[in-house]
Structure formats: C-alpha cells, structure tokens
Image (cartoon, grey):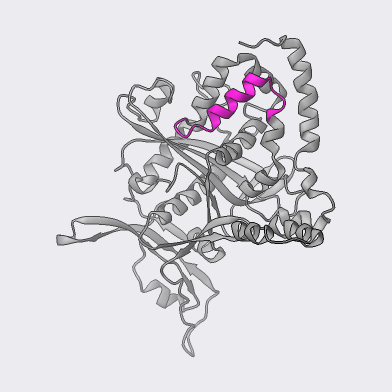
Amino acid sequence: MLSENPLEMDARMFRAMDQWRINSGLDPVFAGLSPDDMQRLGQLPAPVREELSRTADQFLEMFPGQAAKDMLALFSDPDLDIERCYNRLALAHPHVIQVMIDLGILGQQASGKNLGVLDATIMPFRYRLQGGTLFQLTDELNMALENTGIAEDTPMAYFKAPYPSIYIRFGESPCSNIALQNQQSGRHVLEGAYVFEVSVTPHDREGASLEKAERLGIDVTQPYRVIDLLFIGSPAGKRNFSDDTTLNISLLAQDPEETVGAMFERHIAHYAISHDDDTPWFGGLAEEDVSEYQAAVGHVAKALLFLNSSSVRKALRRDRSEAEQALSKLRSASKIRKAKRRALRLYDYVEVTPGVSIREAQGPEAGTRAVATHWRRGHLRQQSYGPRRTQRRLIWIAPTIVKADRALEGSRKPYKAGV
C-alpha cells in the first residue's frame, strides 16, 4: 500500500515525467559527441542503445521507493511474462498503474501500437536485468530470410527461443525491407525484436484469463508457453538515437504439433477484436496495423525457425569485452578517452550465418530472352532422416538470386510455402 498522498504523487510524477522525456538519451557519457557520432550510435542494436542511455533507470526514479523495488523484482523474474508482471504491479500499486495510464505511458494509443512508453522502456530493461543474449543475423542472411517461405506443416516445436531472453537483430545494419510506421516520426526500418519466452504451469490463474485462453485454444489445466515480442523500428535517419518506434504482441503456444501458420492466424483473429476481459494495457489491434504485425511476426518466426534449423552457424563475437580488456591496460588519459568513445560503438553478440551458400543462378544462354534479376524463394521445411527416416529435423533451403530465362525458372515445380 502506498504511503504517499495520491495527489502529491500525481504532481511529482508529472514533473518527473517531463524531466525524463527531456533527458532520455542525453546521458553525460555522450557529451562532446558530434552529430555524426550520434547518428552512428543510432546504428547500434536497441539493447546497446538502451544500456548507453539508461532510459529505464531514469524512468524508475519517477516512482516511490517500494514501487521501484517491486518493478525491479518483477521485471527481472524470468518466470513471469509481461502481462503477469503488469497484473502483479496493479495489485500491489494500483495508483501507480492508474497514473501511468493517465499520463499515456501505459495503455494502447489510438493507432493500436506503441503500447505506451512503459512497455517500450520496460521490455529492453527486462532484457538487461535478465542478462539477455544478442543474436545478429548477417545482412545477407536477413535478406535471404525475407525471401524465404515457411512450409505449411512446420510445427510450433521449432518456434522457440534458444534462451528465455534474447534480442534478434535483423542484419548488421538497418537493411530490412520491412518497416514500422509511427504517426509522428514516419517510417522506421525494422531493426530487430526482443523475444521473451516463459513456461506457464497448469492452473496458473495469473497467466492468460480463462476467456482469453479459451479464444486462443489454450487449456489452462496443461502447461503452455507465452512468447512476448517487442519489435523495434530503427532510429537511423531520425532526430536522435533514441527516436525509434515499437510494435508488440504476446503469443500463447501449447500444442507442439500445431503449425506456425495456424498459431499466427488465431492470434491475429484474437487481437483484431477488443474483448471485455482485456486488461487496459492489452486491448484490440487496430485494422491498419494488421499488415505490419503479419510482416513483423512472420519475419521473427523465420529467424527463430532458422536458429533451430540444422542450417544455422553461430559464433560468439566479444568485441566490447576485448575492447574493455585493452582499455584497462591504458595509462594515458587522452588514449583512455578515445578508447572509451570507440568502445561506445562495440558490443558482444552471437553472429548468425547460414551453413549453406546463397547461390546465384547463371545468366541466360545466348539468344534466349533475358529477365530482370529476382529472387527464387527459399523455404524452411522438415526433413526426414535417421533409421528408416523416422526422425524429423528442420532445414533451410536457401533462396537463389535468379538471372535465368523465365522458361528455365518455370521448369522447376514450385514449392508451396506458408507465412
């Protein structure tokens, strides 16, 4: 129970919120950096930008001591999905939740996305508190996955994160053809996605509500998974490196044999309608946002499936750790300052590359009709192997950059792919 007078708390939070909005992304560590340096920082992955700006730390300063402590405990717990975190916070500190809704930092905006400043702040903070792992696709791989389909029989057993808290960066630079729209700042290239996976035990009433679970086909007497996704639109080319945009959705999965396409369809059907039992911060999905969700969720699905396929190759890159180790050996003040600024643009990550080559088809023979260069789509599908081919594994058939004649392209039987 809060000891602070609610009216006094309102006034203090409004003042703190104004100051937080002014200070976000303007930590003293950036003093003296040129506009070009700031733009380069905008090219960094979202978790690195959040770590540098410490936006969430400033955000927590707005709240009374016990509320801030409870937030830290809730959001650092890897066994809680984001909805249960908010539900517990609402029970313990109802006035804090109401003030955040009134301030517009919690609850959906009219566009049906950018689920308030709280979600866009807390999800990255949650990643940091839980020691999340950054996976970075190469530009070539990300482009290839954009030109890849998912076989219709691909089961949800492969749709899982390698760790409970991860961030997947879609390319070494903002290079995706998928974009998120923001009413104020316009088009943002899809940079990446935070992925949090939590297992919910049977009869857990803090998970999905019974009505919501029923609509989504979940049997609460059996275990199920909650996958919280927060997509990030890159701030590249915007006002500053904190000027990104977000899109979020929570997915519920139970049957490992359910297809990825079926899972996606039932969630879009659910979120396209506002339901009476929805909490204030988990309402319906605006019609104009459906296509963005389809593109964003479809792409993270391909990335997760690829990470669980036999085609993936992963390598740990310790660029930040190695730079900090070298920095500790310096003695000159000027060299230390320069090294610290260089280190701002470095980070540790797992580099994700394909174990198969992305091929280029040969050009047409002399006298044949040429066509424009285009992609022949790849696909993710299951492959039988083992004794009597009774076992299954997920493989990736890489797309091909085609320059051949259309007759040659049409001579191969197309593979029917889903998402």
Residue 136, image quadrant:
bottom right
Q: Position of residue 75 (x, y in %)?
A: 55, 31
Residue 72, image quadrant:
top right
Which residue is painted at 55% across and 46% down in the image? 193
Which residue is painted at 60% across and 37% down in the image? 125
Which residue is painted at 53% across and 66% down in the image? 140
Asked if residue 56 lies left or right of residue 338, the reply is left
Q: Can the viewer see residue 114?
A: no
The one nearer the camera, 315 or 374, is 315
Which residue is painted at 80% across and 29% down in the image? 18
Q: Position of residue 156 (x, y in %)?
A: 35, 44
Residue 391 higher or lower than 218, as above or below: below
The one nearer the camera, 94 or 269, is 94
The number of callouts visible is 0
* 68 inside magenta stretch: yes
Magenta-drawn segment? 60-80
Asked if residue 19 lies left or right of residue 323, the reply is right
Q: Position of residue 288 (x, y in %)?
A: 60, 39
The one nearer the camera, 326 or 387, is 326
Residue reaching furthest to the bottom:
366
Asked if residue 355 lies left or right of residue 71, the reply is left
* 269 inside magenta stretch: no
Q: Position of residue 31 (x, y in %)?
A: 83, 49
Image quarter in which the N terminus is found: top right
